[in-house]
Image: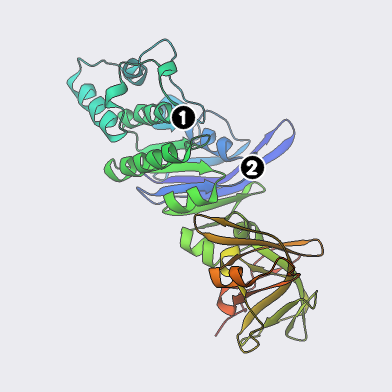
Amino acid sequence: MRVQLRQIALSIAGRSVLEGLDLSTDENEYVVILGPSGCGKTSTLRIIAGLQKADRGEVRFNDTPVTAKPPRERGVAMVFQHDALYPHLTVEKSILLGLGGGTRDPDLSSRLKAAAEMTQIAGLLDRFPDQLSGGELRRAAVAKAIVRRSPVRLLDEPLSALDASARHLLQDDLLRWHRKVPGTTIHVTHDGYEAMRMADRMAILHQGRIVQFDSPDKIYHEPTSLAAACAIGSPSMNLFPARIESNSLVMSDPRIRVALEHSSFGPDCDVVLGVRPESLRAVSGEEPSLRGLQVTANPVEIRRDIYGWRVRAEIDQLTIHGEMNNAVTDGLSDSEKTIRLRADESQLHLFDASTGQRLKEIGAT
């Protein structure tokens, strides 16, 4: 099933939430809509499901308009942000309610068994919701959607407010479901790491529009705009103000130096140079022969996490995030006033400061 949204617009209490939103999925695709809280992600799902009416625009399933159809005729399964289980019913009865049958129906019984096994809740079917943990509640809500076997599945922040172990279990459940049962899954989240792990393609939602819809790898390495670039990563991409003058890239601060082999930039304009924290690494000394970006900054915090050493540094009011290795960390003294961080030319991104759009000339061959 393909899902198509065409020029969807929605205002709530006089505030524009969605404005000209376009989205078209492929058949059996796992799509993640990524954006901050309040950007219209849940409203988009509700419009697809028919639970909310758009001010204008069209919803299509496999090129067939469904905009005028009520929710019950759209054949959509939705997992809500807050678990939709009935508190006075067991998990089994809550899952089966509304499906027009019970466990005596052989087909429903087999579907329930398969869904329970897929989400690892087979031993919880006779329990009530208040007897389940947060992760078990979410997996039961997913099982309820699985039993419906709908060709369109909508997931509203399904992994939010879960601890790490429960979140990873549910991620696996969702991907297992999607791969085993044919259908298109649309999952919304504000978590860039979650989106990167789950999606076949990611749709970056910004100011009511999809600003980039592509594979996680493409969005990470080739964001088409500042909005798309900053949607992924925690900390977000480092951004440095600069200017193109006479086909050269001029940084606004002498402590930020750039040496580029390829420098066909185009007309003079204000720009923003971006580099992801994981691409900006501390070095023990100047390396003038290397192409790319070099920043001399004041270290504010050096800490270790499960992935390695992280550094937070500052140049005046500009905060910079990067990475370090043990050799550089061990060589720093308590009195160290500055630290040098480098990124290779291939890891740099350049954006027009006025439009936010990517300038593809940097690093071009």
Specify which label sits upstream in the sequence, 1 or 2.
2
* Residue placed under numbered mark 2 in the picture: 39
Query: In the figure, is residue 138 to the left or right of 227?
Result: left
Rendered location of residue 271, percent (x, y): 74, 71
Q: Quadrant of residue 146?
A: top left
**Residue 113, image x, y percentages:** 23, 27
Residue 69: which disc? 1
Question: Residue furthest toward the left?
Answer: 106
Most foreground residue, 75 or 317: 317
Please tell me which residue lies in front, 185 or 230: 230
- Please count the marks in the image: 2
The residue at the far front in this view is 334
- Where residue 297 appears, as percent x and y from the top left, is 74, 70
User: What secondary structure is marked by label 2?
Assistant: loop
Q: Residue furthest top?
A: 88
Q: Amino acid at mark 1?
A: Lys
Question: Crowding at label 1, few (<14), some or many (≥20) Cα neighbours within 10 Å?
Answer: few
Disc 2 residue type (three-letter) = Cys
Viewer-nearest residue: 22 or 86: 86
In this rendering, position of residue 361 left or right of residue 183: right
Cα distance in 3D space between marks 1 and 2 = 25 Å
Q: Nearer the viewer, residue 253 or 109?
A: 253
